[in-house]
Amino acid sequence: MTLPQIEDAIDPVLDRIDGLILAPGRDIDPERYDQAPHPLLAPTEPRRDAFELQLVHHAIERELPILGMCRGLQILNVALGGTLAQDVSLLADGHPSDPGWRNWKLMERAALEQGPHPPHPRHEVSIQPGSILAAALGTTSIDVNSFHHQAIDRLGSGLVAVAQAPDGLIEAVELAGRPILAVQWELQEEARVDPRSLAVFEWLIDAAAGVAAPS
């Protein structure tokens, strides 16, 4: 189900689910991590920020499995006290990126029209052996899309970086000892290019099934 952005509904909704996906979307308001807006900041959604930050805290308290993608990784990091670079160029000049989501819009059109994948930014990531991500993908190195224009700067409390781009930017995190994983790339789009990515969604399903199983 898609959750309504109503903070008072968070607990009743979480009572009915066994796992949570934090979806892609717009930039997070930098006031949420005590920064002033940078000229490279893209449009934000303050109402969604408020809802998702509360949602993450409540889901973690309930020990629900969580999978984050792109903005989902960023909101998880901010919820746990981390910060973001408001544009990847502020951390790693030359990192493949998609300012203005121009290439992303081409990918959306291709998907709707069932056409071929247009050229889009990509890069390799190295994955930490023994991580949830490495186990799910069955590899410690994979090539991924790079539609995002922001990145993690300071890690949130308890988060561990489990994947990095060649320039050192964090590409995936896990919450130590918990079934919580988030990746910087658009995982749902990558699954159309590399079927191995579907295994990450299967990990979430299996983790959620463990929550649903009677004790």
Image (cartoon, rainbow, N blue to C red):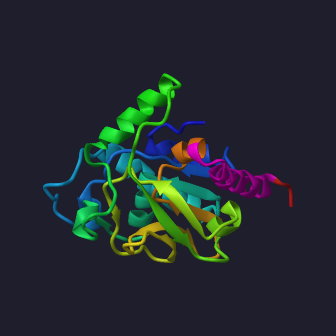
Quadrant in the rendering for residue 204 = bottom right
| Image point (29%, 47%), residue name | 46
Q: Quadrant of the C terminus?
A: bottom right
Q: In the visual, does 21 lie left or right of 155? A: right
Chief SS of the magenta region = helix
Question: Can see residue 172?
Answer: no
x then y, percent, for residue 59: 57, 58
Q: Quadrant of the N terminus?
A: top right
Using the image as rendered, state which of residue 211 and residue 113 is in the foreground: 113
| Image point (73%, 58%), residue name | 207
Task: Give the residues in magenta.
Answer: 193-212
Assess whether residue 194 is covered by the magenta stretch. yes
Q: Is residue 146 above or below residue 165?
A: above
| Image point (60%, 64%), residue name | 180
Task: Give the farthest residue toward the left.
Answer: 39
| Image point (50%, 66%), residue name | 125
x then y, percent, for residue 197: 62, 52
Using the image as rendered, state which of residue 13 and residue 121 is in the foreground: 121
Q: Is residue 188 above or below residue 68?
A: above
